[in-house]
Image (cartoon, rainbow, N blue to C red):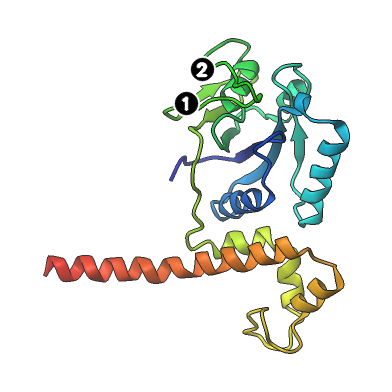
Amino acid sequence: MIAANVDFVIVVQSCHYDFNLKRLERYLVMVKDGGAIPLVLLTKIDLMAPDVLAAQIRDIRSAGITESVMTLSNVTGQGVDDLMSVLAPGKTYCFVGSSGVGKSTIINALMGRDVLETKVVSSTGEGRHTTVRRELFLLDNGAMVIDNPGMRELGVAAAEGGMEAAYADIGALASQCRFGDCTHTKEPGCAVREALDSGRIGADHYENFLKLGKESGRHPMSHAGRRKKDGDFGH
């Protein structure tokens, strides 16, 4: 648990070294399972050629991700006003992502002053781990933003609802499979595998769907096992 009563979660990735489509899908699963609306923000666009940035956005769309994708540079200020324009009064926005992608600097820019400590970027252009606690700030327009420490690991725990929402394209195909309990791995008449073979869905998108599905499905059993072990110990 990182925050409660959040309306939107802004998933921040640097398009320089931090861009990772599989990790982005993982974030989207958990955000949707938590009941918030996800937004995607690509930072450090001043370090990337326009054609490379355009290719990254195409990759996001090719993975079936339909959420809003914004771009921003903390150096040039490009995209800050666009981000500010989507932050609605009375709504809470939580920024999540790896260390060094610029979350604290973005909030300083939105606040119009330095309310969060930041560090000088490294020689590669990446930021350094600075934030060590979560804080909520009220912007001048009435929107609320939450900064978070960089996440080193993000597990998918019993997120069936988030899986359905994040992989709606595969879910629609699954309804056409011959068997209702199709695992989409080796059964005949699998519409998902047929779409994979024909190129309608990408291999990385499909493999991440299977991986996150297994990870989500394992959690209830492991949780029950831990409860039984704790109960036995208590007795």
Is residue 38 something that shows in the picture?
yes
What amino acid is labelled 1 in the image?
Thr
Q: Is residue 81 left or right of residue 38?
A: right
Which residue in the structure is indicated by mark 2?
116
Is residue 140 something that shows in the picture?
no
| Image quarter of the C terminus | bottom left
Residue 200 screen position, x and y as percent: 85, 67
Residue located farthest toward the left when viewing the structure as drawn = 235
Q: Earlier in the sequence, mark 2 or mark 1?
A: 2
Q: Quadrant of residue 7?
A: top right
Local packing at callout 2 (Cα closer than 10 Å; few below 14, some 14-19, many 20+) is some
For the residue pair 163 and 186, the one nearer the viewer reads as: 186
What amino acid is labelled 2 in the image?
Leu
Which residue in the structure is indicated by mark 1?
131
Q: Secondary structure at mark 1?
A: loop
Q: Quadrant of residue 232?
A: bottom left
For the residue pair 3 and 77, the one nearer the viewer reads as: 77
| Residue visible at 80% across and 65% down in the picture | 201
